[in-house]
Amino acid sequence: MLALRLTRSAHPAVQLRRLLVAAASAATGFLLLSALGHALAHPEASPASLLRLAWCTVPLSATVHLALAVARTDPGTRPRPGLAAIGLGPARLMAVSATTTALSTLLGSLLALLFFLHLRGDLTGMPFDGAAADFLAADRPLPLPAALTLLSLVPVTASVSVALMLRPRDAFLAAQAAPRLFGGFGSFGRQETRERFGTYGRSGARPAGGAREAGSGEDTPTQPSAPVNGTEHTPAPLPDPPPLNPTALPWGAALLAAGLAVEGYASRTTTAAPLPLPTGLPTAPTAVLLGWTLTALGLALAGPGLTHLCGRLLQAARPGALRLLAGRGLMEEASRIGRPLGVVCAVASGAYTMAALYDPADPSSGPLTTLGATVVAGCTIATLLTAAVEARQARAATTAALLRLGAPTRTLRTAAAMRTGALLTLFVPLTAVVAELASLPLAR
């Protein structure tokens, strides 16, 4: 019930992000059901049906990635002062986040099932003059347990991933267990838990209100509070960004080079077993798919390091205040927006390859390939925009402090434009080079 109330009372922008998750879940669920329909319509071609189902893992991964980004930016499930005192600690809020994600994805799966049944003619008459009857197996009964199993993949995977991402830290679990381990000091354990996690919870931010850390000799800084309805209100802290791994950039570059090398080797091998790609694309050796996978992983892994590198390059060679502000901002946001930006580059390079090799006159091309590509591209772009919103929320206190110090609004906008330009200057040529090299094995 709490998850439903938080869902209903959310801001329209938050509701829009949840609707995007529901739409992506609906499209992915329809692709899964279409693979089931192909298996029912062509029982003799089970390997082809299994391959269609395997290709659905790509939009499934993109949908789960979007659900994770939306869950991180959901303000209704962030720890706030006093929530731990009424039983809403980080563990309970993590469960609320997972439940909210499950509700959004379940809505999408239900819409996918209704649309699938409508196209089959099970609810009303056969639409589109029966054009979808072939790949949906309209003349065969639909096995409901198999359909429900496929539709449950997106909600279960997304909710479990959100729960793992927002799980409480070990220190919180130890503090929660303190009242049970030390019965005589139960009230002290509860008070310590409330003081440590009621304010900053899983995010790791320092307590607001000038509270003093145990064992420290100085007052901790407080976040700027904004008046809400005439009262002072401390904003809820954002979850901590993933830590920036300094070895991620070399490993990402190594994976990227390995993927391109595997694709180049596959183009020279004539005896390799061909792998049917989605409709409209030619067959290719299995090693090409392995090379694409390594290339995508390399770009995603190297994204935070490349973003951090952009920030450092902006501050090189005697920078001024504007370049320092833009460069430090990029370095701070590298772990938040770097990985989604790397995933977008990987998807863009794949889209370039598909556009170069796609044959519209091929009779095997169909709408399912277009739907899958739209889901993957839309989810990755929406994830990047959601990460940008999260980064903007994270630097809201810094922006407010700069405005109080007299910084012009034009300066802040120019710094944001410099950050965007630096990222485009690095990532656009990198994506073009990777896409051109990745399309060479299939173009021959």
Image (cartoon, rainbow, N blue to C red):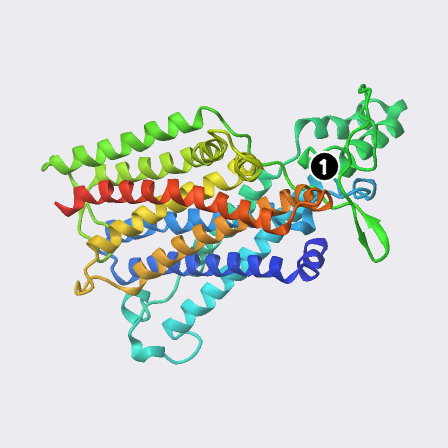
Residue 61 left/right relative to 397 = left
As displayed, is residue 2 above or below residue 272? below
Foreground of the two, 102 or 435: 435
Report how many numbered discs are placed on residues in the image.
1
Residue extending farthest to the left is 270
Residue 302 left/right relative to 403 = left
The kind of secondary structure element at disc 1 is: helix
Residue 353 left/right relative to 197 = left
Q: Percent position (x, y) of residue 106?
A: 54, 58
Q: Percent position (x, y) of residue 236?
A: 72, 45
Whether residue 50 is visible, yes or no, is: no
Image quarter (top left, top right, bottom left or bottom right) of the C terminus: top left
Q: Which residue is pictured at 31% across the width and 46% down the height?
A: 349
Residue with the mark numbered 1: 201
Whether residue 138 is visible, yes or no, is: yes
Foreground of the two, 142 or 366: 366
Residue 14 left/right relative to 87 = left
As displayed, is residue 286 above or below residue 257? below
Q: Percent position (x, y) of residue 223?
A: 75, 39
Q: Amino acid at mark 1?
A: Gly
Q: Which residue is pictured at 70% across the width and 61% down the height?
A: 9
Image quarter (top left, top right, bottom left or bottom right) of the N terminus: bottom right
Q: Quadrant of residue 345?
A: top left
